[in-house]
Image: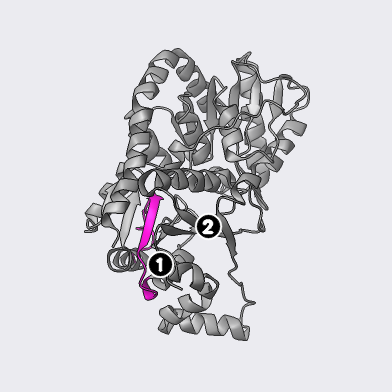
Amino acid sequence: MKREGNRFLFAGNGAYTNRGCEAIVRGTAKILKQSFGDVEISNAFYDHGAGDYVPADLRSLIKNKVISISSFKRFSVNWAIHRFLSSFFPGMLSERMFEQLNDDVETCRAVLSLGGDNYSLDYGVPKKFIYLDKYVKRHKKPLVIWGASIGPFEKYPSISRQIMKHLKDEVYAIFVREKRSFIYLKEHGIEKNVFLTSDPAFVMDATPCENIVYERKLQDNAIGLNFSPLMAKYVTNGDMEAWIELAGEILKGVRKNYDNPIVLVPHVTNPGNNDYEFMRVLLEAAKNIGDCYLLPGYLTAPELKWFISKLDCLVAARTHATIASFSSCIPTISMAYSTKAYGINSQILGNTDYVIDSHDLCVESVVDKIRMVFQNEKEIKDKLAVVIPKIQETAYQSGELLRKILP
């Protein structure tokens, strides 16, 4: 059974229909290959309803497996067992949840917990990731949280204490992607094997996609917009109809104030959380808007990065859409719903001047930020041309750091 060598298991990431999750996998694989040479990689991801979709080129390069986590009907026998084990025997529960990974864990050198913002409250308390960590530790393998933003958890003080204890005692190493998380962990006494690096998606290559035919060709001076249905939770208190209306007004406002063609860029196409479907509704509602079109929902992360690299600027809700843009040296405006947008902008630009907080999101704030970008376009591009190679080098250095600390 023992086949460690340079065999790694990626675990806990989302499905490939989230192009940010795909970008993290691709970037991490590239980093590991540079530091370890020939590597074998398995990727065990949560499907989030997306099934077992894998981009064609990754099917032969990476062994992929869907982590199936059963949801039990309230008050059923399995539900009661799950509740009992979580309260009194969390180790046994973790074995029960992840037994399908036994062979992968036993034969790997380390498990990298991927997924950017999993260890935060953006999607609720990160219980399934904590149980995954416990499972890996029980199998005596190093569990490394990789390229992540951590916290904050203070909204729930008792849970915050539990998570901090877990991170301190049960996680082998933590590679954070921005300074805010690094400082946050240090403030909570977590410093051993904590490394400040960069998001691995910064080193993902773009793939040209010129053979796709659209109703009109992409022009060089286009403005990219990325809206996500997820933003309804933060902008309109979960009122989807109100968010659709506001996003539609923003789209019309950009069209009214700028002659540039508009490209709508979907970056996540998960069932129930689908940028493409959301923006298709916006585009249909904004009849006769002119010079605006929606990229297909089937493009891979490298293909989307290629299109993004052709834009004049991008206004995006999805973090990894902004990373694809920043790493292509494209002026970028972040519609922020969590601290990670502020952290990444601070890391890259040294400020948060081009971040729009979810509470401040409106037609005027987007139009004004685009105007600010165009006024400072040369300064922004010059800054990115200097900073991005350094950030990419930091991402590659994370592979060397990992090589040095692994047993």
Left/right of residue 225 with respect to residue 338 in the rendered view = right
N-terminal of the pair, mark 2 or mark 1, is 2
Q: Residue at x 46, y 47 (%)?
A: 29
Give the magenta range: 137-157
Residue 289 x, y percent position in the rendering: 73, 22
Q: Which residue is mark 1?
A: 133
Residue 100: quadrant of the picture: bottom right
Q: Is residue 147 magenta?
A: yes
The amino acid sitting under disc 1 is Asp
The amino acid sitting under disc 2 is Asn
Separation of disc 2 and disc 1 at Cα?
Answer: 15 Å
Q: Which residue is mark 2?
A: 43
Q: Is residue 220 above or below residue 109?
A: above
Q: Judge depth for marks 2 and 1 and give the one in front.
A: 2
Residue 255 x, y percent position in the rendering: 65, 20
Q: Which mark is residue 315?
A: none
Q: Is residue 175 above or below residue 158?
A: above
Residue 12 x, y percent position in the rendering: 49, 60
Left/right of residue 407 with respect to residue 120 in the rendered view = left
